[in-house]
Image: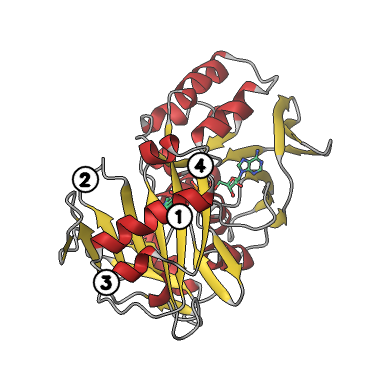
Amino acid sequence: MTLSLCIVGAGAAGVAAAYGLRDERVAVTVLEKSRGVCGRAATRRRDGRRYDHGTSHLPVADSRVSSLVDALGDEGRIDVEAPVWTLGPDGSVVDDDPEPVRRVAWEAGMTQLAKRTLARTEAAVERETRVRAIDRDERGWRVSDEEGGSWGPFDALLLTPPAPQTASLLAATGWSSERAMRLREVVGSVSYRGAQSVVLGYDRPLDRPWFGLRAATADQPVRWVSRESAKPGHVPQGEALLVVQMGDEWARDHEDDPLDTVAPAVAERVATALDEPRLAEPSWTDDQRWRYAKPNGGPPHDAVQVGEEDGLYLAGDWVAGEGRVDAALCAGFDAAERIAH
Ligand SMILES: Cc1cc2nc3c(=O)[nH]c(=O)nc-3n(C[C@H](O)[C@H](O)[C@H](O)COP(=O)(O)OP(=O)(O)OC[C@H]3O[C@@H](n4cnc5c(N)ncnc54)[C@H](O)[C@@H]3O)c2cc1C
């Protein structure tokens, strides 16, 4: 018998689950609220440039992630050779990669991860479909979207949005049982920190040996800087493009500040850290605020599985307890294994 499954969210966790089930007798429908796929592994295009303003790369340490990357093909794939160095609390740049690992990106942007993965499945993908409520009756799970559409019944449901958004869906349900209450409590206890990505574009190249700079300590305002120009296909020759990720506290302090106030302040910090005064004056800028950038840890594994007896599964970086795209993929693979068996 073929099982029907609805996956809410086409980020790394959702697409990995669909991929993990590609050879099983499971009919998968993916509902995604955005126009594009890949969630926080996001890519933007502007005047012939392309930049990953969310996740800058996919760390490949896990064997399942490595097999997926191989299966997605090497055309247009970037194996980022340049290292990640460390940005010290005093603003110094230190030649020290704390986690040397294979790093992968794509010339057409990080969204290729989800696009290529879904293309290797039979899943039906419905974009611009924001799930508003879920419900369960004797025939299975039913899902309603914000446009008034209804989906299902499905034998199983996999929710992959960040924990606070999953908690809202669990609150908007007529499914009531002791298990439902326990699940609401567990998911509701997972908090996220925000971030702001500030994009700095320059009409001159920036030649550095590193691809990214990672903050040495958790309380530094600048958490990460990546040189998008180190990725082939992203930035025209002769230009440079930096994506600077500002941490939670900084993002909150500058929540209401417009980009033309925020960008010069960020550019100034970058110019000082890289000891290159011209970087204080980018030729163009862009930004993205992330309300839910990364989870602050996660719940115990068995706690998120209490809905599974009723066919309700959860996945996402928060289930893995780590704000990393490879962790989200693994959480999706794990959910697929449990759904299949
Ligand atoms: C600025 C930033 C930088 C980062 N840098 C790195 C990095 O360098 N390396 C790294 O490994 N990780 C990084 N991460 C973390 C990484 O992006 C995430 O851990 C990973 O992408 C999470 O995947 P996910 O599938 O769990 O969630 P998401 O990517 O958030 O996917 C959830 C999906 O669900 C959809 N959705 C939500 N609600 C609904 C709804 N009601 N109905 C339908 N769809 C819905 C969303 O649109 C989204 O597509 C970064 C994150 C941010 C924000």
Does the residue at mark 3 contact the one at mark 2 (Cβ under 8 Å)? no
Query: Front-most of 198 and 283?
Result: 283
| Place of residue 164 in the rendered image (x, y in percent of width and height, measured from the top left) | 52, 31
Instruction: Point out which mark residue 257 bears.
Output: 4
Picture residue at 19% right of the left edge, 49% below the top: 89
* In front: label 4 or label 2: 4
Which residue is under mark 2? 217
Instruction: Choose the circle earlier in sequence order: 4 or 1.
Output: 4
Q: Amino acid type of disc 1?
A: Ala
Instruction: Point out which mark residue 263 bears.
Output: 1
Which residue is under mark 3? 210
Determine the CA span between mark 4 and mark 2: 25 Å
Does the residue at mark 4 contact the one at mark 2 (Cβ under 8 Å)? no
How dense is the environment of label 4, judged by Cα within 10 Å: few (below 14), some, or many (20 and up)? Answer: few
Q: Determine the secondary structure under disc 3.
A: loop
Determine the CA span between mark 1 and mark 3: 22 Å
Instruction: Choose the circle earlier in sequence order: 4 or 3.
Output: 3
| Place of residue 192 in the rendered image (x, y in percent of width and height, measured from the top left) | 43, 35
* In front: label 1 or label 2: 1
Does the residue at mark 4 contact the one at mark 1 (Cβ under 8 Å)? no
Ligand 1: does it lie within 8 Å of the C-beta at label 4? no
Residue furthest out toward the right: 148
Does the residue at mark 4 contact the one at mark 3 (Cβ under 8 Å)? no
Picture residue at 38% right of the left edge, 48% below the top: 246
